[in-house]
Image (cartoon, grey):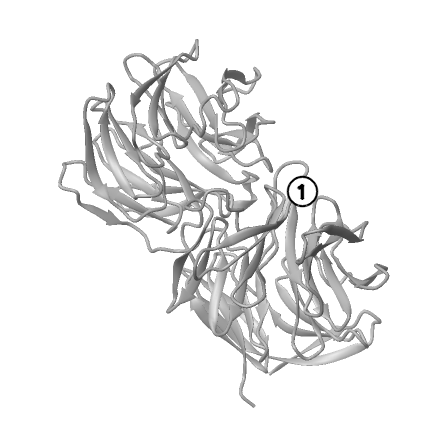
Amino acid sequence: MKKMRWVTIAMVPVVLALSACTTLKATGRQASATLDKHYQLESLAPDSPFPGVNGATIGSDGHLYVTHTGNGTVTRIDLSTLEPSTFVPPSGAVFIPDDIAADDKGNLYVTGTTPLVGEVYRIDRFGAKTIIADGMAAPNGIEYNPNNGRLFVTECFQGNRVYEVDPTGRKPARLLIDKDVIPVPEGFGFDPDTNDLVIPDMGTGKILRIHPDTGAISTIAEKFVTPIALTIGADKMIYMPELATGIVYRVSLDGSRREKLAQLPPGLDNVAITPQGRLFVTSYWNATIYEVSTDGSGQFKQLFPNGPNQTLGVVVKEGAVWVADAIMIRKVADGQYEPTKLNAWASHGMPLTLSLADGPGDQLFWTDCIHGVVAMGNPINGEFKPVAGGLNRPAAALMNPKAPQLFVAEYGAGQITTVSLTDGSKSVLAEGLEGPLALAMVGDTLYVAESKAGRVSAIDLKSGRKEVFLASEVGKPGAIAHDGQGNLLVLDGAGQKLLRVDPKTRALSMVAAHLPVKYATVGSYPVVEFPLSMFVTPNGDIYLNSSDRGLFCLKQRVK
């Protein structure tokens, strides 16, 4: 075994033996981790090749391009071989890309959705991006009209406006439809004869026709269930998937004909069609893509394996493994991610599951940094309730095991807020923190991972006094946890390592190095980060999520 030398905060040298390199198999890739000899690595679920797959378009080169809100990338798929390749990597600074369109000049146009981003990008044939519009509430649908070179964008859920955007970015966006006139305008297309926008309204179940200059609105068809996107084929027919039902429809532009093309699993997001009539539908829930036959046979095929989306938390309760998947909580069993009834799309008003923490009984806590809410729910029966609102980008929550209260890390405010689980009242425990992202309790001390400062602070629960506990040894602490033996575990997303710290002596030891984890920031300014996923069971097993959305465990070796 290779001996490795590490240093405590007080610069007292310690020596730790790490086991030989352990390989974690991923989808088409391999990742290696070096572990403490007391642990062995076990893969629980494979990586996802298409995390958070959303928008879809056919590029001018004939390839299928899809966006991933889950990791900020754009994938190009060769339709002759169905081989995917990364076109825009995570480092391309395309934040939360939701929908995508293509022009006839080799450019792509992408929306960076949610109020955390609010940008519209032009991406050239080399994958380089330019911001052509910003300041929007939640740009979502986007489409380029090759007949006249005009580009339009819809906002979804926040704002619900429709804009015309200058493809060059020289002119400011022009408001076409004001806030909430259309309840939830989604991904859309153009009537090839009139150049009208043809927009599905997920709020009312209608397909709308909108004049591109006057904004005059008329109804083409109605009584659909959550129509989430549409495209118009060379046959001048509308192709539209429904989110909640998984049905894919073909509808005439005058609304006189509608045909059910296929029944897919629920959770669909977008659609693209080639000039030859090959129809592709993306699934946000299952992180995959389907090809649907347009010959009326009802046939379809799944092109890629299922997977999670943006996995942002993991909790293990009574042997069951639960993960937060950005829009739902899933149960992981037999290598599969099973949906539960805690679903932000199916349950109207449910906060987005953007973190996960253990709760009392069968309950789980999660935070929604977009809507500023912390909630509690039961993944078995789907019941949930908001615990507190009015929070500034809450990133993590932790239940106090000694009192009926919840600690919440408010990333935007730089503070830790205490929420009473009895009456929902809030009080500030500690302020002046630099990007509080994760929480853990060891004894009577609350520890906070400060991602902006690259340190961990300790907070006295009685006085609220804070002090720096660990610095310089971690670049981006994205998760922290009590190891069950009185020590603090710190997961470093920049150094890709897991450290164990003794709170009494502050002696440092390495649990694992070269882990397949990494941090990422979201938004141009001000940025926000999401926590890394880590959970420690009472027997000391450590559950982690890989940067490619696979789930694995550092299991304690039997002594």
Q: Secondary structure at mark 1?
A: loop
- Which residue is label 1 attached to? 390
163 sits left or right of 211 in the view:
right
Foreground residue among 53 and 28: 53
- In the picture, the quarter occupied by the N terminus is bottom right
Q: Residue furthest bottom?
A: 559
Residue that sits furthest to the front in the current view: 423
Say which residue appears at 75% left-offset and 75% top-offset.
502
Where is residue 132, by image quadrant?
A: top right
The answer to whether 132 is drawn above or below residue 462 in the figure is above
Q: Residue 32 in the image: state x and y as whole percent.
A: 51, 68
Number of numbered labels in the structure image: 1
Please determine whether, in this image, residue 243 is positioned above or below residue 366.
above
Outermost residue on the top side: it is 214
Q: Is residue 298 left or right of residue 285?
A: left
Residue 90: image x %, image y %?
A: 53, 46
For the point 49% across and 32% down, the residue is 111
Regarding residue 528, the answer to whether it shows in the image is yes
As shown in the figure, which amino acid type bears the numbered disc 1? Gly
Residue 332 as seen in the image, left or right of residue 559: left
Nearest to the observer: residue 3 or residue 240? 240
The answer to whether 189 is drawn above or below residue 410 in the figure is above
Does any portion of residue 476 appear in the rendered image? Answer: no
Q: Position of residue 47 (x, y in %)?
A: 43, 59
Whole-percent x, y for residue 456 in the image? 75, 61
Answer few, some or many: residues within 10 Å of disc 1's Cα (few below 14, many 20 plus, some between 14 and 19).
Answer: few
The picture quadrant where one finds residue 103 is top left
The residue nearer to you, when weighing 502 against 226, is: 226
Seen at 40% across and 12% down, the residue is: 216
